[in-house]
Image: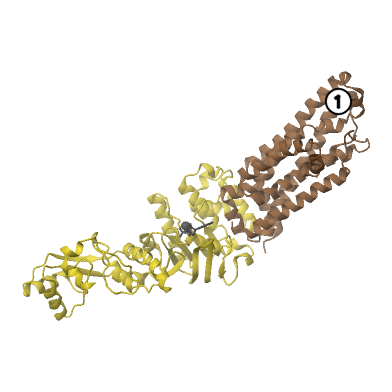
């Protein structure tokens, strides 16, 4: 269990981590998601007592990291930057770490076996590929057989095979009941491995939710319609009991109904449709929307409610020329359609 | 808290498992002993052409340690790399995650580096002394002569303190480039040159190396007006070492890794 309480880190006048409060629970893979520069690595370094917080507190199993005797038996970590002396052999690298925490020597051989580095155990790690270096880092994290494991962007720069290996490893560790905390800047990566999700942007907490909830709220499907008779279509749809959302470029979006049904409805009323497309917002888009807006939420001083404006914003991402268009939504960034776009799409003016 | 014995063992594994330890210490030994031997041989061969005053102040012990001016550069590299390689490689983050009690980590590292330097330093000084004296023929000093054993043991202490000074300084500077870039020129050029400049030299005599080297002198030189004796000199150096080590610890404790 890792508990953060208002954890803050400032570098000069830049706030890298801004009052983070959340708990990493045991037995699941918790994804720590945020774009590059969001403060993930900084947060993890503070968890490990490497960087001292400018404010707030972080505890591992109720204690500060520095209060743990033989911490590697509680928590193992793989940091983003390489933290290995390349002049040492893989075996000696692990041995010196093991000795400091009184971990028996045979564990060194065991973890080398686990990560598949036995054959190169006596080689200096300087010559290792990125993937091998990553495996050595993971071997070090596993040495103390810890209950908590922390990986900072473990798949960065790895080949597909390495990525596959790490995913399975993390799932296996969580299946053994361990706490796994893994960061990434890719939603797709998280969706594959994490059960719980913590999203940060610009150092701030944006979401703390189960992956299932996040998917349910953010990957909604909907149908997009375009017509030269917007007013009539709107009336028809409303009369049929559908909630219509007008987007910035004059299209309509309807949730919770099949495209076929809407097409039939339009035909019944002899409405011309220029577009009728079933859409699905991807998680990646939902995530990008969530974090892109973190700037805006800064100004309001509130944490973004998941599934609120996010869902509203996410639905337009598949359309290149489209813009998120729930007008008047609090916290919605003022995004202008291309200059002159409203002349071609007179309908959009109504929404604004 | 981490068990101190376990951390010492871990630091010993670290220090013995990198090549730079072996080559810096081997180089320090070889250069000091070989250069001392060459100089001793040269003095022995040119004895007859030396002036009487030179003969009167001839210090066979100090002559055999002449190679240390060059050999100490390798010790500086050793002392600096012991700590700054942790930073340059990122190993420091692994080390401090394993041993978050920074005082324990630091004292263990200092103890292991200092202990190894003491062993290598003493071996170097005794071998260098006996090799040099063997080549000085009839002008040699004996280990039983007054002040000679002190000078030989002192040479080993000097090398140990120099390494510890570099460990402390490197802990403050962190980067190997900065550490080597400042310490090598200082001990090889700045300090010896300043200690030869009139007026300035009264200050330069209190530099760690100038003060520490006093202990290797058995026969006082004529232009020698320093206000401390051999043990006073090594004491002054020890003060520098303590200050550097404390400074290094403060930086390690305060700064993010
Ligand atoms: N040592 C440092 N000094 C100054 N700024 C830093 C330092 N470390 C990180 N930062 C800044 O803090 C922010 C968060 O960085 P980081 O934690 O590495 O983000 P992430 O891991 O999410 O990509 C970035 O803007 C980065 O430039
Ligand atoms: Mg990072």
**Residue A31 pos. (x, y %):** 43, 65
Along the viewing direction, whichever of A215 and A180 lies nearer the viewer: A215
Q: Residue furthest front?
A: B199
Q: Residue at x 16, y 79 (%)?
A: A238
Residue A169 appears in the rendering: yes
Q: Residue at x 89, y 43 (%)?
A: B229
Mark 1 sits near ligand 1, with its Cβ under 8 Å away: no
**Left or right of A299, for residue B89:** right
Secondary structure under tag 1 reads: loop
**Residue A200 pos. (x, y %):** 43, 66
**Residue A226 pos. (x, y %):** 15, 67
From the rendered image, report the letter of the chain displayed in brown: B
Q: Colour of chain A?
A: yellow
Which chain is home to disc 1?
B
- Residue named by callout 1: B136
Residue B25 appears in the rendering: no
Which quadrant of the figure contains the C terminus of chain A?
bottom left
**Left or right of B103, for residue B158:** right
């Amino acid at each position: 269990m890792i508990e953060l309480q208002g954890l803050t880190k400032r570098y000069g006048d830049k706030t890298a981590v801004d009052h983070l409060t959340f708990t990493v629970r045991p037995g699941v893979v918790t994804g720590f998601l945020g774009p590059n520069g969001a403060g993930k690595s900084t947060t993890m370094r503070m968890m490990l007592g490497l960087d001292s917080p400018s404010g707030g507190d972080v505890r591992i199993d109720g204690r500060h990291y520095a209060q743990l005797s033989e911490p590697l038996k509680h928590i193992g970590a793989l940091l983003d930057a390489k933290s290995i002396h390349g002049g040492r052999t893989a075996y000696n690298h692990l041995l010196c770490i093991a000795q400091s925490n009184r971990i028996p020597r045979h564990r060194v051989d065991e973890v080398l076996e686990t990560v598949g580095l036995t054959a190169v155990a006596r080689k200096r790690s300087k010559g290792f590929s990125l993937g091998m270096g990553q495996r050595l880092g993971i071997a070090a994290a596993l040495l103390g057989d810890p209950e908590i494991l922390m990986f900072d962007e473990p798949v960065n720069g790895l080949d597909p095979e390495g990525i596959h290996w790490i995913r399975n490893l993390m799932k296996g560790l969580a299946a053994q009941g361990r706490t796994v905390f893994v960061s990434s800047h890719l939603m797709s990566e998280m969706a594959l491995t994490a059960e719980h999700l913590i999203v940060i942007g610009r150092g701030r907490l944006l979401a703390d939710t189960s992956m299932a909830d996040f998917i349910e709220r953010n990957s909604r499907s909907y149908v997009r319609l375009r017509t030269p008779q917007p007013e009539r279509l709107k009336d028809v749809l409303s009369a049929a009991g559908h909630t219509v959302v007008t987007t910035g470029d004059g299209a309509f979006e309807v949730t919770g109904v099949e495209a076929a049904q809407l097409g039939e409805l339009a035909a019944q009323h002899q409405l011309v449709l220029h577009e009728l497309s079933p859409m699905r917002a991807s998680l990646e888009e939902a995530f990008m929307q969530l974090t892109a807006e973190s700037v805006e939420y800064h100004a309001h001083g509130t944490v973004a409610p998941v599934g609120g404006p996010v869902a509203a914003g996410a639905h337009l991402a598949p359309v290149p020329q489209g813009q998120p268009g729930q007008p008047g939504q609090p916290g919605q960034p003022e995004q202008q359609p291309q200059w002159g776009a409203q002349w071609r799409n007179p309908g959009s003016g109504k929404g604004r | 808290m981490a068990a101190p014995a376990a951390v010492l063992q871990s630091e010993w594994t670290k220090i013995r498992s990198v090549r730079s330890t072996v080559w810096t210490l081997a180089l320090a030994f070889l250069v000091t002993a070989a250069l001392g031997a060459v100089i001793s041989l040269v003095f022995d061969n040119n004895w007859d052409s030396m002036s009487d005053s030179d003969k009167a102040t001839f210090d066979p012990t100090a002559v055999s340690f002449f190679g240390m001016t060059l050999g100490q550069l390798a010790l500086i590299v050793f002392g600096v790399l012991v700590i700054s390689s942790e930073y340059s490689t990122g190993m420091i983050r692994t080390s401090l995650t394993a041993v978050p009690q920074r005082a324990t980590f630091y004292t263990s590292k200092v103890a292991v580096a200092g202990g190894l330097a003491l062993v290598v330093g003493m071996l170097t000084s005794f071998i260098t002394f006996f090799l040099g004296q063997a080549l000085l023929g009839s002008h040699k000093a004996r280990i039983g002569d007054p002040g000679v054993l002190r000078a030989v043991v002192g040479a080993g202490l000097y090398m140990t303190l120099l390494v510890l000074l570099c460990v402390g300084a490197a802990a403050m500077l962190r980067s190997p480039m900065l550490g080597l870039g400042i310490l090598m020129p200082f001990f090889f050029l700045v300090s010896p040159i300043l200690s030869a400049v009139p007026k300035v030299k009264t200050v330069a005599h209190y530099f760690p190396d100038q003060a520490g080297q006093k202990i290797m002198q058995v026969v006082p030189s004529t232009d020698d007006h320093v206000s401390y004796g051999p043990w006073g000199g090594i004491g002054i150096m020890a003060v520098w070492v303590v200050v550097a080590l404390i400074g290094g610890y403060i930086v390690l404790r305060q700064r993010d890794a």
